[in-house]
Image (tube, helix red, strand yellow):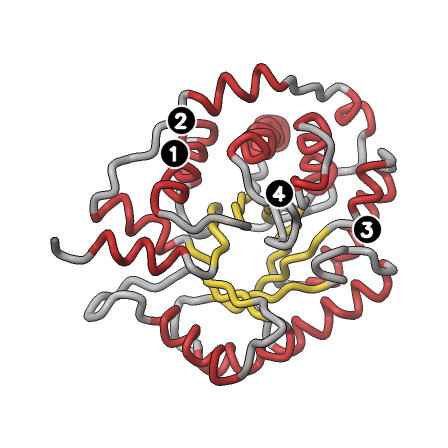
């Protein structure tokens, strides 16, 4: 389900204030589920299996794609998507044909986001033409740091238009933002502009996904849904490597948004090494 967005409304953003005490009180009560089979299969089925390395090769991506289609031997379970750089999109699309695994790519000046909006849009259009069904776009953080909310809105709006039928996942790079109020406000602006998902991090910041930053985003998603009726997805990414960590994000999403958000259409975890940790929990002891 796509988010059509709403007109820019500065008053909605200005009224957002989220204190550290509120965030800490909420995240402190989150308890990950026991890592049994049912609990572990959830993040696997919602996983964006990712390889974004300067040393990626076609052979390395082939291995990633094989793992994405059949992470568990003799099981129909697949991951939700693979996320690769643009040169590997066509390869991924061909290899995943007939599966339920989507092809995602980063576009628009990843990971810094410091690129002219027109060039960002051209990059997105090229990625979609190559076969990407999902675009992971990182925002220009300077627009948040200077509170130029209307410019951020129009940047995301232009990129959403460039996506066409593809899903737009907007990366906030929360570790680069000053506090949870800024994270919540940026979340609102991106959703107003039509973001289908909002995502924590690129994986290249000094601080990547945190439960605190994620709570600010999830609360914004809930409030946006309450106001508009539009459901926006959430993607946690960056530094999520252990089963316990992944299950903490599952628990947080369920606590704030409810079980209806816990499917691949509305919830993702982006990671490269996490799958191996999850699979170990499924092995007989």
Question: Which secondary structure, mark 3?
Answer: helix
Estimate the spatial distance between the alpha carbons at disc 4 and disc 1, rounded to whole Å: 21 Å
Q: Position of residue 169 (x, y in %)?
A: 62, 53
Q: Are marks 2 and 1 in contact (CB under 8 Å)?
A: yes
In the image, 185: left or right of 279?
right
Q: What residue did someone put label 1 on?
A: 251
Estimate the spatial distance between the alpha carbons at disc 2 and disc 4, rounded to whole Å: 20 Å
Estimate the spatial distance between the alpha carbons at disc 1 and disc 3, rounded to whole Å: 32 Å
Categorize mark 2 by other alpha carbons within 10 Å: few (<14), some (14-19), many (20+).
some
Is 189 or 111 nearer to us in this picture? Answer: 111
In the image, 1: left or right of 6?
left
Q: Which label is found at residue 207? A: 4
Q: Position of residue 43 (x, y in %)?
A: 37, 50
Is 281 or 44 nearer to us in this picture? Answer: 281
- Residue in the image at 70% along x and 53% along y: 138
Q: Are marks 4 and 1 in contact (CB under 8 Å)?
A: no
Question: Which secondary structure, mark 1?
Answer: helix
Question: Which secondary structure, mark 4?
Answer: loop
Nearer the observer, disc 3 or disc 4? 4
Q: What residue did someone put label 2 on?
A: 30
Estimate the spatial distance between the alpha carbons at disc 2 and disc 3, rounded to whole Å: 34 Å
In the rendered image, the vertical position of residue 224 relative to residue 66, given as above or below: above
Is 166 or 84 nearer to us in this picture? Answer: 84
Compare marks 2 and 3 and give the one earlier in the sequence: 2
Q: What residue did someone put label 3 on?
A: 155
- Residue in the image at 72% along x and 67% along y: 124
- Residue in the image at 56% along x and 69% along y: 84
Q: Quadrant of residue 69?
A: bottom left
Estimate the spatial distance between the alpha carbons at disc 3 and disc 4, rounded to whole Å: 24 Å
Q: Are marks 2 and 3 in contact (CB under 8 Å)?
A: no
């Amino acid at each position: 389900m796509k988010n059509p967005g709403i007109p820019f409304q500065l008053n909605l953003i200005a009224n957002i204030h989220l204190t550290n005490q509120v965030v800490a009180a909420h995240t402190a009560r989150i308890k990950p589920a026991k890592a049994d089979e049912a609990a572990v299969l959830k993040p696997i089925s919602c996983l964006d299996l990712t390889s974004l390395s300067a040393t990626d090769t076609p052979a390395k991506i082939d291995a990633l794609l094989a793992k994405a289609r059949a992470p568990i031997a003799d099981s129909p379970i697949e991951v939700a998507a693979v996320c690769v750089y643009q040169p590997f999109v066509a390869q991924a699309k061909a290899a995943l044909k007939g599966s339920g695994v989507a092809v995602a790519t980063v576009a628009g000046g990843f990971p810094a986001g410091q690129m002219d909006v027109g060039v960002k849009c051209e990059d997105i259009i090229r990625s979609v033409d190559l076969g990407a069904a999902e675009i992971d776009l990182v925002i220009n953080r300077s627009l948040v740091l200077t509170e130029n909310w209307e410019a951020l809105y129009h940047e995301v709006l232009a990129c959403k238009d460039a996506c066409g039928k593809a899903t737009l996942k907007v990366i906030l790079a929360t570790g680069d933002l000053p506090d949870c109020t800024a994270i919540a406000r940026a979340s609102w602006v991106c959703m107003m502009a039509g973001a289908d998902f909002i995502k924590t991090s690129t994986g290249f910041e000094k601080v990547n996904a945190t439960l605190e930053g994620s709570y600010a985003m999830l609360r914004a998603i809930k409030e946006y849904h309450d106001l508009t009726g539009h459901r926006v997805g959430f993607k946690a990414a960056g530094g999520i490597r252990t089963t316990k960590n992944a299950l903490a994000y599952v628990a947080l999403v369920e606590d704030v948004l409810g079980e209806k958000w816990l499917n691949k259409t509305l919830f993702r975890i982006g990671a490269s090494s996490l799958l191996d940790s999850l699979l170990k929990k499924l092995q007989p002891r």
